[in-house]
Amino acid sequence: MRKLNYLFALVFILISGRSFSQGMMPPSPISSPMLEAATGTWVSEPYEMMGMKCTETVTQKMVLNGQFLEVNVKNIMDNGFVYEGIGMFAPSGDGTMSGTFYDIFGKNGMMNYTGKVEGNKIIMSGANDKMTEERIITIDGDSMTSDVTFKMKDASENSMPEQKLTVTYKKK
């Protein structure tokens, strides 16, 4: 009788596990030609930011069953300073997205973004306590351009003048 109870318990576990897993199927990966074009490793032409020459490498990939866009940034400045950050963005089937970008400055560097895909552009708006940013990313084959407008606050919380920057990348 005891062996029969174990058999029933085993059958129940196998059946209930399969029934539960059927309801836990992940959604289909997000399908977006623009996000597919954005994936890969991109290296910037040297550019100037805040009086320093910079070269940036951006690696973008769809992760977690194609539900999120992971963006890794490494910026090397001519004075030896290395800036690094990682963003996780959740695109939707309608072309909108939201996400958060984290960097070496910890909680002070976190920035929340909203955005949308329009044609061959990704248009993003980001903000945190110290900065606001508007970014238009245009991809044309193996060339990517990021037009950035940002405004920072100084230590006294006064807004500094708005700054504009264009960074051009080539796909590696």
Image (cartoon, rainbow, N blue to C red):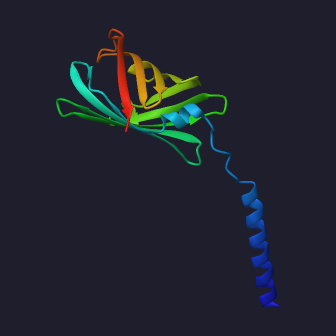
Q: Residue furthest left?
A: 79
Q: Whole-percent x and y of residue 100?
A: 48, 33
Residue 121 or residue 81, whichever sits in front: 121
Quadrant hosting residue 59: top left
Q: Left or right? Give the position of 135 relative to 94.
A: left
In this rendering, is residue 29 above or below 157?
A: below
- Quadrant where the N terminus lies? bottom right
Q: Whole-percent x and y of residue 81?
A: 21, 33
* Residue positioned 67% across, 29% down in the render: 94
Residue 150 or residue 1, whichever sits in front: 150
In this rendering, is residue 162 above or below 32?
A: above
Quadrant hosting residue 107: top left
* Residue positioned 46% across, 22% down in the render: 127
Q: Whole-percent x and y of residue 52?
A: 21, 23
Q: Whole-percent x and y of residue 77?
A: 23, 30
Number of marks in the rendered image: 0
Quadrant hosting residue 68: top right
In this rendering, is residue 134 above or below 105?
A: above
- Quadrant where the C terminus lies? top left
Q: Left or right? Give the position of 80 relative to 156.
A: left
Residue 61 or residue 161, whichever sits in front: 61
* Residue positioned 75% across, 54% down in the render: 23
* Residue positioned 75% across, 72% down in the render: 14
In this rendering, is residue 26 above or below 163?
A: below
Q: Residue furthest top?
A: 161
